[in-house]
Amino acid sequence: MEWDEFAHWGKHISDWAAEYHKTLRDRPVRAQTAPGKIAAQLPTAPPESAEAMDAIMADFERIVMPGITHWQHPRFFAYFPANAAPPSMLAEMLVTTIAAQCMLWQTSPAATEVEGVMVDWLRQALGLGAGFSGVIQDSASSATLSAVLTMRERATGWRGNREGLSGQGALRIYCSDQVHSSIDRACWVAGIGQDNLVKISTTGPRHGIDMEVLRRAIASDRAAGHIPAGIIAVTGATGIGASDILGPVLQVARDEDLYTHLDAAWAGAAMICPEFRNDFWADVDGFDSIVFNPHKWLGAQFDCSVQFLRDPQAQLNTLKIEPEYLKTSGAKVTNFSEWTIPLGRRFRALKIWFLLRAYGVEGLRGRIRNHVTWAGELCERIRALDGFEIVTEPILSLFSFRCPGDDATQQRLVDALNDDGRIYLTQGMHKGRKIIRFSVGQFDCTRDDVMMAAQVIDEVWKEIA
Ligand SMILES: *Cc1c(COP(=O)(O)O)cnc(C)c1O
């Protein structure tokens, strides 16, 4: 492709993008396609000769678009949001254009230096102490794996990487029974093993880790000759928003000399609003590692996950490797690939820079506050529907409910709502019962979009009941 042709299509696609976003409300949120239908429309073998860009673009609209679930639809209330605010999309285009590998300072000094400053801007925006530095990773899963590996190495006296894990004893990691599956997988691939991830029951209105049970579990593990290695706490777990009370968790970690990691992948964004910090983040500065995803609620296009570290040295001791071909001569500089598992790195910090400057932290706060308020209002409307039950009260902008009937009926309502297409919801499990989750947070959603959900739920329920 010649660059003049590139410029033509680049303009076409950015016009297409604006039009797509302006007309999103008219599309069904969840793709309405049957399994296999998209693949069946593609040739089974690659083309031998060149094809014209208009043919490729036409097929994109004809074949691909009907198979897209619209995550940027203002009535996307499923999972958690994956917001891509327009300034972050523009930054992403620049990042793609430059296509630099940002593994070392010298492979793009601006990427490393902007990243350092953006992590610090976000630290301030979240009200974290000045002691934290950090790194931008692809996903919370990777950041959590980095933290679990650090727990492992610290607990084995830094022998795991060198000697392997056989004969190191059973390393134990503690968390609540509400944590995200990325914590399980981090323990699988770090060689800790599922059986050594000790899940503690939860208690209280925020469904936080039961401290008594935690202390007893650690004591009995020590008595059995196991090696406690770390605690993973959560603020805003995926199922219902479960949030641990951080101070007591940190006290146990100090008493037991355990490394601590906090998963605030979704709810971390809300901590830009000072009024939520007392309830959710008191004492947060005591954590060794904290992960939060600007690519969820905040508005930085996926992928963009920030891991804050109180002292990066432990993670560097775990992950840093420096073959000759990666050495930098001269001045002492930060090489962020030494902080993470992958070597290659995208220039993710540019999205944060564009996003924070284009809205200001106050502009982003306004959105999050609206979402929390509207979730509360909608919760009351659903509570008022005949026979409906609120199962878990709103935690920030997430709550869960049930319609009248058994578990199968809950799923039938979710499926019928998603087939209807005006809104998109997903189900979950809480205390052995199926629940319907409602999560507010799409960047462009309005109060009308959220309130409309109560009416759609009522209508669709009456059709299937
Ligand atoms: C989304 C989420 C994750 C996983 O995030 P990725 O960036 O997709 O790996 C982990 N924990 C919580 C609480 C989440 O909401």
Image (cartoon, helix red, strand yellow):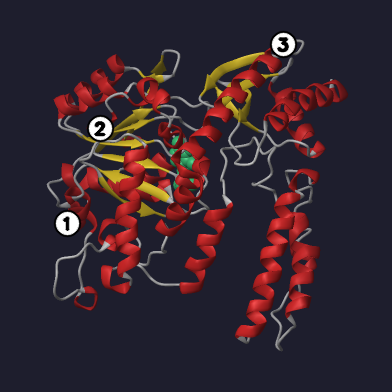
Write down the quadrant of residue 17 in the picture. Answer: bottom right
- Secondary structure type for disc 3: loop
Q: Position of residue 366 (x, y in %)?
A: 53, 33
Label 2 – label 3 distance at C-alpha: 40 Å
The mark that comes first in sequence, 2 or 1, is 1
Q: Residue at x 47, y 66 (%)?
A: 95
- Depth check: 19 or 29 in front? 19
Write down the quadrant of residue 414 in the picture. Answer: top right
Relative horizontal placement of residue 358, taking residue 446 as reference (left or right): left
Q: Residue at x 29, y 55 (%)?
A: 116
Q: Amino acid at mark 3?
A: Ala
Q: Which mark is residue 163?
A: 1
Label 1 – label 3 distance at C-alpha: 61 Å
Residue pointed to by mark 3: 384
Residue pointed to by mark 2: 285
- Secondary structure type for disc 2: helix
